[in-house]
Amino acid sequence: YPSVIKPGMEYKHAKELLSEEKFDDSIETFEALGDYKDSAAMITEARCLKAKNLLDKKEYDAAKEIYEDLGKEDAVKEVTYQEAKDLLSEKKYADAINILMRFEYKDSDELLHEAEYGRGIELMEQENYVVATGYFRKAKNYKDASSKVGECKYLKGLQYMDEGDYYAALKDFEAVKDYDNGEVLKKAEKKISEIEEQKKYTVDFTYSELNDGSVKGKI
């Protein structure tokens, strides 16, 4: 009888440890029971519960390691998916992109475009319009990504104007019409007109200087 009672008590104790979320102690106790009852199945259950607990604490790699060891590929994908979603909610767009660009599961394509769009907004706020444009293009039809490309072109054009590079500015302003047909386009067209006027002034001024050395341009 004692040889039956002791494993029974240990089995009950292992379950109690599991209910208290003392996963490692529970697993160790079940392992010591060998093939008693369904101890082997309980070890798997305890490890799965431990992985879920790790996921809740956002310890993604540790959770994935357990699921991978158990051969639960769908669970590994679910952890990766949840990690990407959590990164998105925390606005860690670059980190989310690094996961989603090589991951296909559920609506991961849509999440990738969301992350690319968010990263584009971040870069716009940093006035890095060229790189932001690349992310908005990748985001494709997500929200107003196309219009954002036009807005970036317009803002980059303004930067070029401030730097005195009117040729580059004109090129970006003219590109706006491919992505926007609203207020941004109107502003871009106004800047194009300003540059055209500046070009006239430059031609007149240069011509006067070349002919008689005087300043007769449109000042």
Image (cartoon, rainbow, N blue to C red):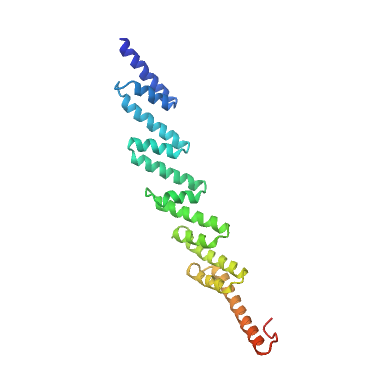
- Percent coordinates x, y for residue 183 in the rendering: 56, 67
In the displayed image of the protein, which residue is found farthest to the top? 1
For the residue pair 145 and 24, the one nearer the viewer reads as: 24
At x 41%, y 45%, the residue is 81
Q: Is residue 194 visible?
A: yes
In the displayed image of the protein, which residue is found farthest to the bottom? 211
At x 66%, y 87%, the residue is 208
129 versus 71 height, above or below? below
At x 31%, y 26%, the residue is 40
112 versus 163 height, above or below? above
The image quadrant of residue 196 is: bottom right
- Percent coordinates x, y for residue 166 in the rendering: 58, 73
10 versus 89 height, above or below? above
Q: Is residue 159 left or right of residue 49?
A: right
For the residue pair 4 and 204, the one nearer the viewer reads as: 204
- Percent coordinates x, y for residue 189 in the rendering: 56, 73
- Percent coordinates x, y for residue 201 in the rendering: 63, 81
For the residue pair 87 and 110, the one nearer the viewer reads as: 87
Q: Is residue 84 left or right of residue 163?
A: left
Locate the C terminus and report the quarter of the image it occupies: bottom right
At x 40%, y 53%, the residue is 109
